[in-house]
Image: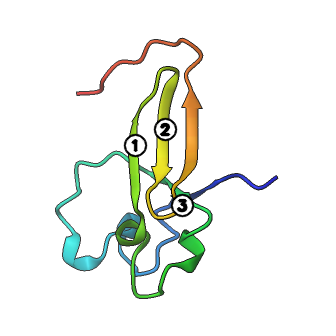
């Protein structure tokens, strides 16, 4: 069974920008620590070539009773639902 998500890193973007950020967006997201992204495996392959993965993604993310979930708004499906198995999480300032 194929996973419902794709992981892209900074070397797998379409517009040549770092981490899927087009050149006109540089500087706006320099504080991001994200090195790899969860994307929907259903709609990401349908992405037009002139749109970056970041601009194409339609996701909402949030805490659940057991962990953290990433949901595809375009496809109305779960991308990934992480179960932290009761581990306590802390916020990185």
Identified at 38% across, 66% down, the residue is 54
Q: Which residue is mark 1?
A: 61
Instruction: From the top left corner, tell me how far across and down residue 36 is, in percent.
Output: 49, 52
Question: In what element is the residue under mark 2?
Answer: strand
Quadrant of the rendering where the C terminus is positioned: top left
In percent of width and height, residue 22 lies at 30, 76
Check contact, mark 2 vs mark 1: CB within 8 A.
Answer: yes
Q: Earlier in the sequence, mark 3 or mark 2?
A: 3
Residue 5's place in the image compared with 26, above or below, is: above
Dot 3 or dot 1: first in sequence order is 3
The x, y position of residue 43, in whole percent, is 55, 70
| Label 3 SS | strand
Distance in Å between CA atoms under marks 3 and 1: 17 Å
Look at the picture and state if 10 lies above or below 86. below
Left or right: residue 63 compared with residue 41:
left
Q: Disc 2 marks which residue?
A: 69
Q: Nearer the viewer, mark 3 or mark 2?
A: 2
Residues at circles 3 and 1 in contact by the CB criterion of under 8 Å: no
Name of the residue lying farthest toward the left: 27
Residue 26, how many percent across, how many down? 21, 69
Q: Is residue 46 above or below residue 70?
A: below
Please name the residue shown 47% across and 73% down the image. Answer: 13
Q: Nearer the viewer, residue 89 or 41?
A: 41
Gap in Å between the C-alphas at discs 2 and 1? 6 Å
Q: Which residue is mark 3?
A: 8
């Amino acid at each position: 069974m194929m996973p419902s998500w794709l992981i892209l890193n900074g070397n797998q973007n379409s517009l040549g920008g770092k981490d899927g950020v087009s050149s006109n967006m540089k500087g706006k997201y320099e504080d991001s620590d994200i090195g790899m992204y969860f994307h929907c495996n259903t709609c990401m392959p349908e992405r037009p070539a002139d749109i970056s993965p970041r601009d194409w993604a339609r996701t909402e993310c949030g805490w659940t009773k057991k962990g953290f979930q990433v949901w595809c708004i375009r496809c109305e499906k779960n991308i990934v639902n992480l179960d932290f198995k009761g581990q306590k999480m802390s916020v990185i300032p």
